[in-house]
Amino acid sequence: MVHDRFPPASRVVRVLALVALGVLACGVAVLVDRRWSAPIESPRVRAVDFDVVVVDSSTGLAVAGAEVGFDQESGDFDDPGPSWAGATDSGGQLRVVGYFAAVAVPDGRGGFRGTVVFHDGVPPSSVPDLLVVRAPGYRGATIDLDARFPRGIAFEDRSARTIRVPLAPGFPR
């Protein structure tokens, strides 16, 4: 008769511990494989800074207190209108931040490269993003950002874009 060093109960515990350790190792291997083989999620939106300078079109002087905002040319009958970002200072300037669609791919160094676009959808049915400016005593102005930046802006380029907006004196439309 062969004499075992371990009683039968402890042998069962050892086998269960080895099985649990194997299941844990397989679970870790699956998680690591998923992490390494999963596609990197591309950012869909990026903030773009604009330095807006509003001037009187006839005198060239700064227009203080002009409201600046973003809108989309939706064509809806009951359009919600622009979302106002702020008003210009005494020098007619305001830095606004807009969030726009981005088409980007991983660059291999942990970042992304691509283009920030100023429209929603695919041409010809795309909806352009607009920069809207209004001030008391002036006609409002609308800047089509897609027309102003037809090639978009490089995703990696974080510099602010300056947009000069001349407002014509007169009553708002």
Image (spheres, grey):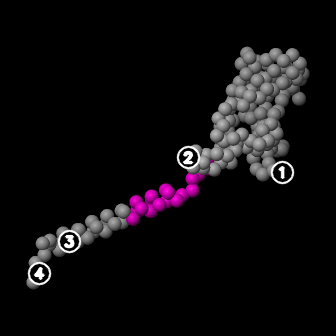
Q: Amino acid at mark 4?
A: Val
Residue 2 vs residue 96, the one in the foreground: 2
Left/right placement of residue 112 relative to residue 171 reads left
Question: How far across and how far down the image is residue 10, in percent?
Answer: 18, 69
Residue count near mark 3 (Cα–Cα under 10 Å), binned few <14, some 14–19, many ≥20:
few
- Determine which of the numbered discs, if any, sits on residue 124 in the image: 1
Distance from disc 3 to disc 1, alpha carbons, whole Å, reads 73 Å
Q: Is residue 39 magenta?
A: yes
Residue count near mark 2 (Cα–Cα under 10 Å), binned few <14, some 14–19, many ≥20:
few
Distance from disc 4 to disc 2, alpha carbons, whole Å, reads 63 Å
Q: Is residue 40 visible?
A: yes
Q: Toward which corner of the image does residue 58 lie, by quadrant?
A: top right
Question: How far across and how far down the image is residue 51, in percent?
Answer: 71, 27
Mark 4 or 2 closer to N-term?
4
User: Of tags 4 and 2, which is closer to the observer?
Assistant: 2
Q: Amino acid at mark 1?
A: Pro
Residue depicted at 36% across the width and 66% down the height: 23
Distance from disc 4 to disc 3, alpha carbons, whole Å, reads 15 Å
Distance from disc 4 to disc 1, alpha carbons, whole Å, reads 86 Å
Q: Amino acid at mark 2?
A: Arg
Secondary structure type for disc 2:
loop
Left/right placement of residue 14 relative to residue 60 reads left
Mark 4 or 1 closer to N-term?
4
Mark 3 or 2 closer to N-term?
3
Reading the image, the residue beneath label 3 is: 11
Residue count near mark 1 (Cα–Cα under 10 Å), binned few <14, some 14–19, many ≥20:
few
First to last magenta residue range: 26-43
Left/right placement of residue 88 relative to residue 23 reads right
Residue depicted at 72% across the width and 31% down the height: 161
Reading the image, the residue beneath label 4 is: 2
- Determine which of the numbered discs, if any, sits on residue 109 in the image: 2
Q: Is residue 142 magenta?
A: no
